[in-house]
Amino acid sequence: MADTTQQITLSAELESLSAFRNHVKTICQNISGLDEQAIYDLQLAVDEICTNIITHGYAGMDPGSIILRVEVGTEDLVVTITDFGHAFEPVEPPAPDPNASLEEREIGGLGLFFVHSSVDDIEYESSPTGNTTRLIKKFAK
């Protein structure tokens, strides 16, 4: 597949999550280096990042927008998610203890653990013009 870029901008509301997931799936279905599991992983990562932007980034603010750009290169796919809310860096949380009971587990962080497990690299940048999260997934060879 030749290098391509596609972008959508939607309201930062939970109702937009399915459209973001579908946008990623539609683009990824035609990429030979991504199998069904890799596509699902990317959808999960996008869903988690966008959910955090909606619930934390725009907390206490009117819902703004989220720009989702998907760039398909020759060796990887880069999903760039831009918002204009409060900065919320998706740092990698500690791995959850699989032996801990639900009562013993800490609340939060599991979604970001899945994000970091689903992609090859994550880059985050915050500036006065907005916050940008890049999810990078390399193609299988």
Image (tube, rainbow, N blue to C red):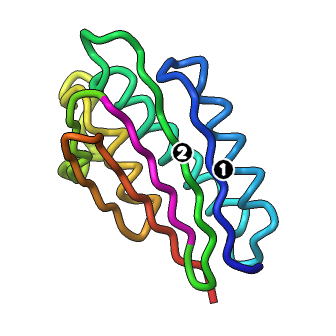
Residue 20 falls in image quadrant: top right
CA gap, disc 1 and disc 2: 9 Å
Label 2: state its secondary structure: strand
Residue picked out by circle 1: 24
Say if mark 1 contacts mark 2, CB within 8 Å.
yes
Which of 129/14 is in front? Answer: 129
Relative vertical location of residue 39 with respect to residue 54 in this rendering, above or below: below
What percent of the width, then of the height, locates residue 21? 64, 40
For this view, does 6 lie left or right of residue 131? right
What percent of the width, then of the height, locates residue 77? 56, 69
SS assignment for the magenta stretch, majority: strand
The residue at the point 47 percent across, 23 percent down is: 12
Magenta stretch: includes residue 82: yes
Instruction: Of the two numbered discs 1 and 2 on the same chain, state the one appearing first in sequence.
Output: 1
The residue at the point 71 percent across, 41 percent down is: 22
Which of 48/99 is in front? Answer: 48
Q: Residue furthest front?
A: 129
Relative vertical location of residue 19 with respect to residue 43 in this rendering, above or below: above
Of circles 1 and 2, which is in front?
2
The 10 Å Cα crowd at callout 2, few under 14, some 14 to 19, many 20 or more, is: many
Residue picked out by circle 2: 68
Q: Which kind of residue does numbered mark 2 sit on?
A: Leu
